[in-house]
Amino acid sequence: MRKLNLLFVMLLILYGIQWIKANDTLFVKETRIPVLLERYDNVVFRMRFDTQKAKLLNAVTLRFGDETELKNIHSVKLYYSGTEAYQNVIKREFAPVEYISSHKPGKTLTANPSYSILLKEVKNPKKVVQFSVNQPLFPGVNYFWISVRMKSKAAVTSTFTAAITSVEADNNPAVVTIESPKDIVHRVGVGVRHAGNDGSAAFRIPGMVTTLKGTLLGVYDVRYNSSIDLQEHIDIGLSRSTDGGQSWEKMRLPMAFGEYDGLPSAQNGVGDPAILVDELTGTIWLIAVWSHGMGNQRTWWSSNRGTEPASTAQLMLVSSDDDGKTWSKPINITKQVKDPSWHLLLQGPGKGITMLDGTLVFPIQYIDSTRVPNAGIIYSKDHGKIWKINNHARTNTTEAQVAEIEAGVLMLNMRDNRGGSRAVSVTHDLGIHWVEHPSNRSALREPVCMASLINVKAKDNILNRDILLFSNPDTEKGRYNITIKASLDGGITWLPENQLMLDEDPGWGYSCLTMIDNETVGILYESSVAYITFQAVKLKEIINKL
């Protein structure tokens, strides 16, 4: 009898599921992507209305969370984006197309009218917003979405929460199913570089530091013709902020070769920057790799043995003594550090560091004589006059970041071509000897991508704890889920409680971290909403378990 009753219950459940599927249901997916201050439309909710009977969508009600500062919100909009093709219905998507482009010049800030119809806009919204629309519904799948525009004066650390509380169709309550995590916090950001800015098609490879004066300096590739890597027409761009990332000055070009030595600009590209601040002198150093010639093929494969520009890419430095306003002429250090048998030597993009004893350190990568890549460091004991190199940390590794975890002890966190997880090694003697760290190839997953690592001493942060901060796409495949993680035990463990995901959607995935002040970390990264995005996050929002 018990088996029969159980079977009856299971049939009722199965029937109930089928009934729900057969009835008109609005499926809601709340986004976890940056809300840009300069964007007129930021996608906050994507909605799919599976309709069989309903003819009209009458109303959608949205409620902001109690902690939301409504004074920061300029407006909220409801859009209709039409229907789904029959053969795609089974995919159960939440958007038929990209509503706002992150990569099409001039089309990165507002909804594309080809793909969306504005149904309702509410300016200066109250806590509860009702969109009364009476939108006709097409039989099958209908797409809607809600956007938010922030006020330009909203703090870059601003956040808000919101929820879809009710939907009416044919003047009756509709079934609403939420298909996203609970308690999503929407975080403000700034698109420092958008496609089309300053006549450039794309921007990539961010690095960032905080100067001794508290100025933020963000560097990146200016890729004029497309998003592809060197060799191409690429300059090093720099954006400067004196207000904690709230606003950014007009782009500078601290390193650009243009038409040089009889070759066009697309055969004089310079890219993949890293930047550091000499903590003793205040001098800022910027390093990048310059390719001369190579016929617009990829430098990674076209650079060859030797040290001369005609045969191999060149390792170039520029410096600034006025807080990043002006920059020196390029200095070529290739012959100082490159083994002539290697095919290519370049920096690990992102940033370098000043050690406690004043030694300047940049992470590097090189392709050896057998065409195998290796990661390591270069260093200077005399504030940038002479640079030296020792041994690589691990073979078959590329883009790396370095941090001093104890006095004289360097940790190198590396992109590993084996995939799946980060490689981590430690040296006590500037790279003469390396040993695997306990977290090597185990603690930090990655999809084979660049990442960022910084060490924040207890005396320099509000939590009064030594903290390692790390950022990357927190996946094993695909570049999405950009996440900041914190370790309180020197990188051995990275607790789930001490992580914050900033951007769930796909992008290029490169990032760079810096402390803005003793309680706020800044991140400059390749996001899903702009080529180069900046966000500022409080340490207490990342670290929940001390």
Image: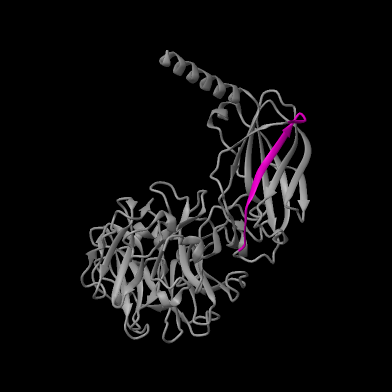
Which residue is outermost to the front? 1
Q: Is residue 113 visible?
A: no
Decide if residue 521 is on the left or right side of residue 105.
Answer: left
> Would you say residue 117 sits in the magenta stretch?
no
Q: Is residue 225 visible?
A: yes
Q: Indicate whether 87 appears above or below 506.
A: above
> Would you say residue 161 sits in the magenta stretch?
yes
> Which of 223/12 is in front?
12
Q: Which residues are magenta?
A: 158-172
Q: Indicate whether 515 appears above or below 64.
A: below
> Which of 470/385 is in front?
470
Q: Position of residue 101 (x, y in %)?
A: 61, 50
* Quadrant of the image occupied by residue 278: bottom left
> Which quadrant of the rendered structure holds the N terminus?
top left
> Which of 1/462 is in front?
1
> Which quadrant of the rendered structure holds the C terminus?
bottom left
Q: Residue at x 52, y 22 (%)?
A: 13
Q: Position of residue 65 (x, y in %)?
A: 65, 52
Number of numbered markers: 0
Q: Residue at x 59, y 22 (%)?
A: 19
Q: Residue at x 39, y 75 (%)?
A: 353
